[in-house]
Image (tube, rainbow, N blue to C red):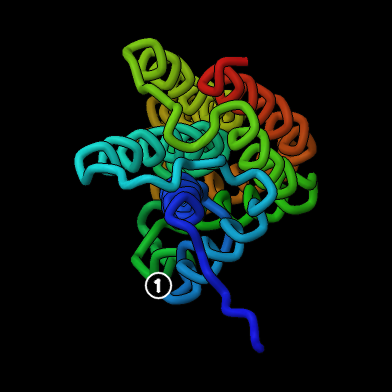
Amino acid sequence: MHDSLTLSTGTLYAFLLTLARVASAITFVPLPGLNGASQPVRAAFALSCTFALFSRWPAMPDNEVSFGTLMVWVAAECALGIGLGVCVSIALEGFAFAGQMVGVPAGFSFASTVDPNTDADSTVLVTLSQMIAGLLFFALGLHREVLRLFALSMERVPAGKYIFNHTSGEMLIRASADFFLIGIRLAMPVVAMLLIVDIAIALLGRLNAQLQLTSLAFPVKMLLALFMLGVVAAAFPNILMEATGHSWATAHHLLGM
């Protein structure tokens, strides 16, 4: 006599709540290549991560749960997943912000390219910064930290037990300040050098009005911006590691650690 596979109601509740947390986090975690993937691929990735966390699924009651209680649990899991995803995305999006800060004064904002993640038009330096951040994300092994964070969240805050309060929102708002700090730290050396070039060109034009330096300004600033980015690129891994360290600390605070 063949045994039949049966799933208890508690197992289904545990699967649903874990999937809600993981899928909400993946939506905001800027994993390179995942945002540009099709919806079935992203759904399959969320399901695979959910099944990988099977040993951390919570023990849910087998009795019937009201629809309102289940929706409250799902909303809490989505809130926690979004919070974890935002914590991780702050560090990577800071690189895109730095590319935007450099691209405008350097003159690269006049040229656009296709963003491989969204298939939308984007400036050259913003797309380049996102690609560099994505490569460093995998090269430094930060993708493993994201998966470890999922497992830790299931251990510290079982599904259905998280309560989003004003303290959690305040921590996320404070952590968002790192977004601007990362961009400023990356872009400030380049922007300062471009400012010096603008002042020098303005003084030369003031001293001799016959000099037509406008046609030379854009090529000089573009080459100088690329040179300075090459010099500053040596600090990219250290800045990303420091930024993600703050992101993990914020995520741990959300988990009550």
Q: Is residue 121 left or right of residue 159?
A: left
The N terminus sits in image quarter: bottom right
Q: Is residue 31 left or right of residue 73?
A: right
The residue positioned farthest toward the left in the image shown: 68
Check disc 1: other Cα within 10 Å, few if <14, some if 14-19, many if 20+: few
The residue positioned farthest toward the bottom in the image shown: 1
The C terminus sits in image quarter: top right
Residue at x-position 53% and y-position 64%: 47
Q: Inspect this view and state whether residue 16 appears.
A: yes
- In this view of the protein, which residue sits in the foreground, 192 or 164? 164
Residue 101 appears in which quarter of the rendering?
Answer: top left
Residue flagged by tag 1: what amino acid is it? Gln
- In this view of the protein, which residue sits in the foreground, 139 or 19? 19
Q: Is residue 113 left or right of residue 155?
A: left
**Residue 80: x %, y % from top left:** 43, 33
**Residue 228: x %, y % from top left:** 67, 39
Residue 29 against residue 200 in the figure, above or below: below
Residue at x-position 44% and y-position 15%: 171
**Residue 173: x %, y % from top left:** 38, 18
How many marks can you see?
A: 1
- In this view of the protein, which residue sits in the foreground, 135 or 235? 135
**Residue 139: x %, y % from top left:** 79, 51
Residue 23 against residue 229 in the figure, above or below: below
Residue at x-position 52% and y-position 50%: 30
Residue 40 against residue 79 in the figure, above or below: below
The residue singled out by tag 1 in the image is 39
Q: Inspect this view and state whether residue 106 appears.
A: no
- SS state under label 1: helix
Residue at x-position 30% and y-position 43%: 65
